[in-house]
Amino acid sequence: MDFPIFHMDDAGNRMLIAVIAIIHVMINHPMAVGMMPLITLMEYFGYKTGQKKWDTLAHKILFVCFIITTTAGALTGVGIWLSTSLINPYAIGSLIRVFFWGWFTEWIIFVIEVSLILAYYLLWPKMQHSPKAKLNHIRIGLTLSIASWGTMAIIVAILGFMMDPGDWTTTPGLVTGVLNPLYLPQLAFRTPLAMIGAGLFAWFLMIFFVKKDREFLNKAIRFVAIWSLCWLPLLMVGALWYHDRIPTMMQSNYDVAIATQQWAAKSNDLLWITWVSFIIVVATLAIGLLKPRFMPRLALLIPFVLITALLGQFERVREFIRKPYVIGNYMYANGIRVEDYPLLQSEGMLKYATYTHVREVTEDNKVIAGQDVFNIACTRCHTTQGVNGMVPKFNNLYGADKPWDATAMKAYIQGMHNARPFMPPFPGNDAELEALVAYILHIKQTGETLPGMQSGGIVISPDASPKKTVQISASGDDTSNATP
Amino acid sequence: MTPTLLNLITLAQTQTPVPHDIPLPLPAPRELIVGVLIAMFLVHILFVNLMLGGTILTAFFQGRSILKGSNDDDILAYEIAKTITVNKSMAVVMGVAPLLAINVIYTVYFYTANALTGYVWIGIVPTAITAFLLLYLHKYTWHSDFMQAHRKLHHSIVVFALLLLFCIPFVFLTNINLMLFPEKWGQVQGFFSAMFINNNVISRFLHFFNASLAVTGLFMVWYVGLPSFKVEDRFTEINRAGLKRRFYMMAAAFTVFQFAIGPLVWLTLPNSSSMDAMNVVLVIGILFAVIAVILLTLELKAKDEVIGHMFKPIVILLSVTVLCMGTGRHMYREKTLMSHTLDMEYETDIYVKSRDAAWQLKQLEEAEGGMVLDGAKLFNTICATCHAKDTVLAGPTLMEIAQIYKGNPKGIVEWAKAPGRKRAEQFPAPMPAMGHVGEERLTAIANYILKVTQPDGGVDATPAPEPAATDTTTTEPAAQ
């Protein structure tokens, strides 16, 4: 409504956020949050036992994590922000106003984290000369571990808030926002997940870093297996707690969330695959603990791949089940606030939007008005012909070769949020709904696509409501409609 | 109203979009966020300068070492390369705070500019990742046998990283330039057209590029002076004082050059000459820079034993210059956006009032289970935040309204559907159009207003039902 509409009509907008966010989580959780304490522990173990091999291995693993987290890790973090501000500026703009101090605190911890990882890695060779220096170095690692976890602990508050703001909708404020019902359960789940992920990534790196010394490899495999298995019970508890707190309304979204709409019927199979993957991870860890010498070197790759896939799947489910909202009970996925609905549904969205071709739907402008409506109400998640496209969707519904019935489409869109609880209600008025149907029929017929405003530019709405300057200049003679 | 005048004004208005702001309060006093923005942005840009300047120097000295075979150049290049990867991490992390601040204070402006340059804007992320990975590759393969055997290939890595780093400032500069000129938003079609809405982006890039070299020169004077920077047993052709002099020369030359580029930036900045306060601040900044340059020339002439003793005053003077430039920039931003921000606040206010009224009405009718035509209830739900019987709130009192519209409820309805502005000085906040409430409900409200203001009416919670409002619960809301 108020921002030019960035739109990627082929892959879809959600894809952009998804790619950046999932890369970020896959780096941040195992390689920063989980790995820093694991490396510190390994370094400490080497220091205590006097075995240099542990120190060398820890340093090598840190090198990889240092390179990845300070490049792709840090920048995809900023990238989530940049991409969400392109795709849903309403949501991120609101979140930043609620969580400004949360983000600000996170930034301070982030500064500490980056400074410490630079110190931890770069001073590693220099702080070897005395046991005292080594111990100080280990202390840097410990502080770094806390800071890494701290940044995640803050961000998770925001993620929890987006799913269920709890009391915030009635008593707005930072504190009520942070204390949302999903915060602690989600943190309790993510923390052990990050720790286990780190263990499995360390295993994966050992394929390259411990080549000849099979005896040491066995020890290292067991070390990491113990670490990961210690976190496993916490992971289970966290998962149950988190699952328990997900609002019931969202649980109806599970099928589609897990498997996408196309495969929703098979979501059980996918749930099975998830469970089997999980069991394989646990079984590998058990072998690592009990009989590390039986573990083929290359097999160390498998649990890492599986846990990465599980993490990706978890993020997709989390992203999806909060629908139809982008901020629970406050803002729908289309960026329109729940409070805006009554006005827009009676007066129409076009009347209040900034970038539209027309303000009012007429017989002649139906298609172009429909395009404006589609742009405002649908494009955050849908495309014309591409991923999650209108034409493919209705093709599935009514058949690609048959003519579609406008009246049926209208009725469908009107009631769609009842049948498909992940869809927001249609935010416009009746005329706008008709225009939208006309537009969908038009793009089916012509195969037309819709470029985003990042390439096509904006159209500024013709002014229906009088603006300030107009009113002031007209204020001298505006009594015409006021005098009795 | 004269229609032609109105049309003309409306036409002029459509050139500049006036969107609604995010209807949530700022999370902190505005001045505080502005302080964060100015201060942390300067810290961020300092590290960006060092990252870019360091990469340029590394590429330069390594290139010269390959061409001329000087081992000193190679050592120096490697030493500088080690600083880049640290400075680049700090540049990223220090960029987060100003980004947060600009997101909060200039939400609509910044996000609009981002959206209009979308693909290139998000392209910053992979570009920076690639550049950073190349810089690591360059640094950590420096002494490998393969790269020692293929030094040109090795050098090409840093050159490629440098080319990528050059692209990023254009994207940021284009965005923060574009956000200041809403009247140009309508002309923009993609990134490159946004870059050229005026010539300021190019001149500011030059200004930034030049500043990077000046700042890095100064940084290197400090860096080669560190006790941990070993000179004597490594460099053959130059001593520590020579290195310091070399980088002082660099800092001085590019600072002087900045006196030519600065005015170019100023000239390409729309309306800069009319902004007196900003210009005073800028001139103060320039004066400090002039003194710094004098000290720099003294340092260049200083003997080996004493060179570097004026380093601190030079840094302080130039920091004041930079602070003045940052503050001047902010003053420009505020002044340029002022009138548009007022328009936007006005529009947002009106919109929020309308949507709140519609929301309250919906809540009321959901609670009552159907259409409400009870004037008192409707008034209390929709109008009472701004109007009271005898007390002046955001809008005039009911007594006053009743006086104007005595015996004319329809007049009230018409006004509410399309309110004008009769007394903008007395009531600065405008009344939103209430057409969405519907004719029937508005009539009920109007009757209530006229009734309650009669000498015997009295405002109380249970006013006598209006003839039109006896039927309080019909099932279907009337279509408008």
Image (spheres, rainbow, N blue to C red):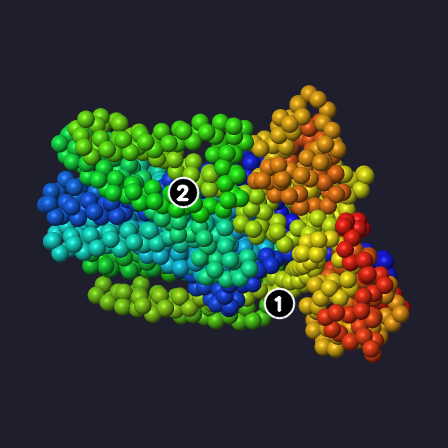
Do pointers 1 and 2 mark residues of a single chain? no
In space, the residues marked 1 and 2 are separated at their CA atoms by 46 Å
| Amino acid on which the number 2 mark rests in the picture | His
Q: Chain of mark 2?
A: A
Image coordinates of residue A42 in percent, x first then y, are 19, 44
Image coordinates of residue A172 in percent, x first then y, are 53, 61
| Amino acid on which the number 1 mark rests in the picture | Ser
Residue found farthest to the left:
A50
Residue B274, which numbered label? Answer: 1
Look at mark 2 in the image and give the residue it sits on.
Answer: A24
Image coordinates of residue A94 in percent, x first then y, are 54, 55
Up-down relation of residue A210 to residue B380 (above or below): above
The reply, left or right, for residue A234 in relation to residue A440 is left
Q: Is residue B27 visible?
A: yes
Numbered disc 1: secondary structure? helix
* Residue B227 placement: quadrant: bottom left
Image coordinates of residue B8 in percent, x first then y, are 80, 57
